[in-house]
Amino acid sequence: MSPRAGQAGHPARTLAFVESPVQLLNVLEWAHLHGLPDHPPSRPATGAPAGAGPNGTASASPPAGPAPALPAQAGPVLPAQAGPVSACVSAPPAQTRGSTVGAAARGAVAGGAEFTVVVLAPTDPMTRGQLRRMADLARDEGYRVRWEEARGGTTAPFHTIGGLAGLLRRAGRIVMGDPFSRYVQLLLTITRARDLVVVDDGTATMEFVAQLARGERLVRWHRKGGRPGARDLLFAPVSSSARRRLTPSGGRRVEVFSSMPVTETPEGVTVTANDFAWTRARFGPPRITDGADMVGTSLVETGVVDGERYLAAVRDLARAHGVTRYFAHRRENTGKLHRLAVETGLEIVRPDLPLELIARRGPIGRTVLSFPSTVVHTLPLALAGTGVRVAVCDIDPAWLTATASPRAQGFLSGVTGTARDVHRLTAVAPA
């Protein structure tokens, strides 16, 4: 499927809907693969990283040596014995934007085709801060970005959907980061677009493709097996409609752009590999330190893993492998992070961008430890050729909570088992 192909030979109007920083990163990767935008950015990127040309565009290959750090390199950090974890929350840029941002002043459309990234802003402060930074990167690359306060009150969804209805009806292509999102599913009922693209939203992409192939209802893996609630039943017709829209038929094309392993490909769906070419061209290579870093997970926050078991596992891993820094997931609770800092002595880092970008611009440890998560698939791609080793520690079944989905252990084992170019730790012990 060519992004330039629209009806009657005209470039397609494209709308991309994102709700997380990683989704926006993968929209940029998808657009880069397909040659969008095909003009230089309208202005140089602030703090252009190594490998950037005079206009902020990426050169064919990054120069040798460490890349200069961008401002606010990894967000504020929390020393081991410092004050409350809330102090390490990365603040969004000082300027305040309205509902629509940057359409004319910050970026042009690509090759005559209208390409607008719509941010359906969440309420979580950390996610919002990272999205602000990613939105700035997107504008630096020449894209239009429209920021929607989609969850800013009871009437916000009506204003958001009403304001986007015209764009949705005119769009020839919809790019989305989360097909499980009720917001996105509702928007799919409005559009007449014939081209639908799903970009990675982490490990959830694996489950989405498998459910689509089996004709199942779209349910996030950590909720599967539970009884549908009242809201689930009320929204069921919209979810069913979205699943039908995401099934190729009658000239409707569906593409999945993913760095995750896809073992069940639905009939008619095009799967395109995401190898993080934009990230590697735009950032780094990073400076490598001799120590080890650890990547945090929100499995405690989603109710899958017991908090005390997780704390003990992090403490044992840090001691066994000489870990000094802990890169927190944006959804991790500040109380949990404060306990980790005090009880393990780790420096807690709250990144202001997705970890793939933070790691690529460095500094990053020679070994990066992680629990089963998206990064065990994405970091080896983003850090290809740097010599950094990614090691993943399995989730012991004893760590799971009583309320964890029956599918949790199998799914997490699958995330680890299908990861390429990683070292697998079967126990919390030295490598």
Image (cartoon, rainbow, N blue to C red):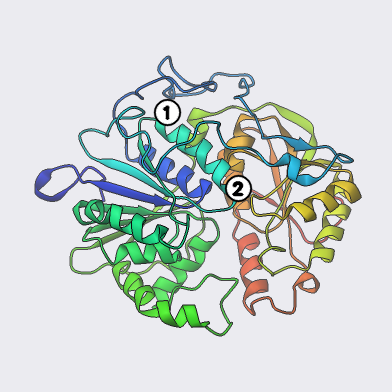
Task: State left or right for residue 196 relative to residue 257.
Answer: left
Q: Nearer the viewer, residue 172 or 61?
A: 172
Query: Tag 1's secondary structure?
Result: helix
* Residue 172, horizontal then vertical, whole percent: 21, 52
- Please report the residue visible at 40 percent of the width from the left and 17 percent of the height from the top: 55
Note whether 391 is above or below 248 in the view shown. Answer: above
- Please report the residue visible at 71 percent of the width from the left and 56 percent of the height from the top: 371
Identify the mark at residue 140; answer none if there is no mark: 1
Q: Nearer the viewer, residue 85 or 198?
A: 85
Mark 2, residue position: 125
* Residue 347, horizontal then vertical, whole percent: 81, 40
Query: Tag 2's secondary structure?
Result: helix
The 10 Å Cα crowd at callout 1, few under 14, some 14 to 19, many 20 or more, is many
Residue 431, visible in the rendered structure: no
Q: Most extreme residue toward the left, as rendered? A: 8
Q: Nearer the viewer, residue 420 or 325?
A: 325
For the residues marked 1 and 2, what is the alpha-carbon distance in whole angstroms?
A: 23 Å
From the viewer's perspective, is the residue at label 1 or at label 2 nearer?
Answer: 2
* Residue 35, horizontal then vertical, whole percent: 32, 35
Note whether 64 is above or below 420 in the view shown. Answer: above
Q: Amino acid at mark 2?
A: Pro
Note whether 189 is above or below 356 in the view shown. Answer: below
Residue 231, visible in the rendered structure: yes
Identify the mark at residue 239; answer none if there is no mark: none
The 10 Å Cα crowd at callout 2, few under 14, some 14 to 19, many 20 or more, is some
Q: Most extreme residue toward the bottom, as rendered? A: 227
Q: Quadrant of residue 428?
A: bottom right
Q: Quadrant of residue 332?
A: bottom right
Q: Amino acid at mark 1?
A: Asp
Q: Quadrant of residue 105?
A: top left
